[in-house]
């Protein structure tokens, strides 16, 4: 990355000042111009209104209800079943935690981690490392938070004339 962009900060900000001039036109045409046009349209049409509003009890309940029980848990080993069994008072603490993450624009490092596991692709088990695939097991609380936020973003995008299920479908099929 440093070789092409100069610094990580340049990459994060799409700053082409240290980039080989051969790539400037490509960056402008493919990224910078569309990004500026989309930002202008988004600001003008209110694409992102409501995205950063506090998460409601109803949103939390819906996301928990949609979560699939019986799946592997992340590092804390708190499964979806345990989250679904929480009382109203305990769910209020989860809701407060999620709204603090939203307000601070950050998930605590201790929750922003995953367990890496290898899953066998065949009956050979783990004996043949060429026949396994890795998975990352995230914290279920963070999966629920992500589900709420992605749902909000998709809802807003779908309400614009720029996004349709046709051009979003291939993103959704990925996971």
Image (spheres, rainbow, N blue to C red):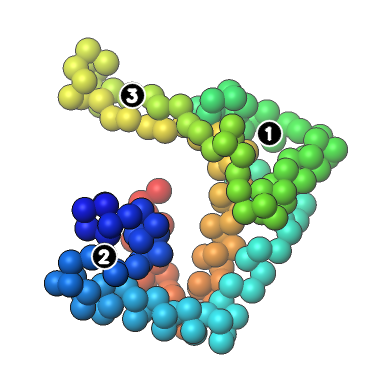
* Between discs 2 and 1, the one toward the N terminus: 2
Work out how far the residue at label 3 is from the one at label 1, CA to CA, in angstroms: 25 Å
Q: Is residue 98 above or below residue 159?
A: above
Left or right of 173 in this view: 142: right
Q: Which of marks 2 and 1 is in front?
A: 2
Q: Is residue 106 above or below residue 93?
A: below
Left or right of 93 in this view: 163: left
Is label 3 in a helix, a strand or a loop? strand
User: Residue 147: x, y in percent?
Assistant: 56, 51
Q: Which residue reaches farthest bottom?
A: 44
Work out how far the residue at label 2 is from the one at label 1, CA to CA, in angstroms: 48 Å
Q: Is residue 74 above or below residue 22?
A: above
Is label 1 in a helix, a strand or a loop? helix
Residue receiving disc 3: 118
Q: How crowded is mark 3: few (under 14 residues within 10 Å), some or many (20 or more)?
A: some
Residue 140 seen anywhere in this rendered image of the structure: no
* Between discs 2 and 3, the one toward the N terminus: 2
Q: In which quarter of the image is residue 38?
A: bottom left
Q: Which residue reaches farthest left?
A: 22
Give the residue drawn at x 26%, y 65%. 18
Give the residue drawn at x 26%, y 79%. 29
Q: Nearer the viewer, residue 113 or 84?
A: 113
Work out how far the residue at label 2 is from the one at label 3, CA to CA, in angstroms: 40 Å
User: Residue 10: x, y in percent?
Assistant: 35, 61
User: Residue 142: x, y in percent?
Assistant: 59, 41
- Determine which of the numbered discs, if any, sits on residue 62 in the image: none
Residue receiving disc 1: 83
Residue receiving disc 2: 18
Give the residue drawn at x 40%, y 48%. 175
User: Residue 35: x, y in percent?
Assistant: 39, 76
Left or right of 16 in this view: 155: right
Q: In this view, does 11 lie above or below 29?
A: above
């Amino acid at each position: 990355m440093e070789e092409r962009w100069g610094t990580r900060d340049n990459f994060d900000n799409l700053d082409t000042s240290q980039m080989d001039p051969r790539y400037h036109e490509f960056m402008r045409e493919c990224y910078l111009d569309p990004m500026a046009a989309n930002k202008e349209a988004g600001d003008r049409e209110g694409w992102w209104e409501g995205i950063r509003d506090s998460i409601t009890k109803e949103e939390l309940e819906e996301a928990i209800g949609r979560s699939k029980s019986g799946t592997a848990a992340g590092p804390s080993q708190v499964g979806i079943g345990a989250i679904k069994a929480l009382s109203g008072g305990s769910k209020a603490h989860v809701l407060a935690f999620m709204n603090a993450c939203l307000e601070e624009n950050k998930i605590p490092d201790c929750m922003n981690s995953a367990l890496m596991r290898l899953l066998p692709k065949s009956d050979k088990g783990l004996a043949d490392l060429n026949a396994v695939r890795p998975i990352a097991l995230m914290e279920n609380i963070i999966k629920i938070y992500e589900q709420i936020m992605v749902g909000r973003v998709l809802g807003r995008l779908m309400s614009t004339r720029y996004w349709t299920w046709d051009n979003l479908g291939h993103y959704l099929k990925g996971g």
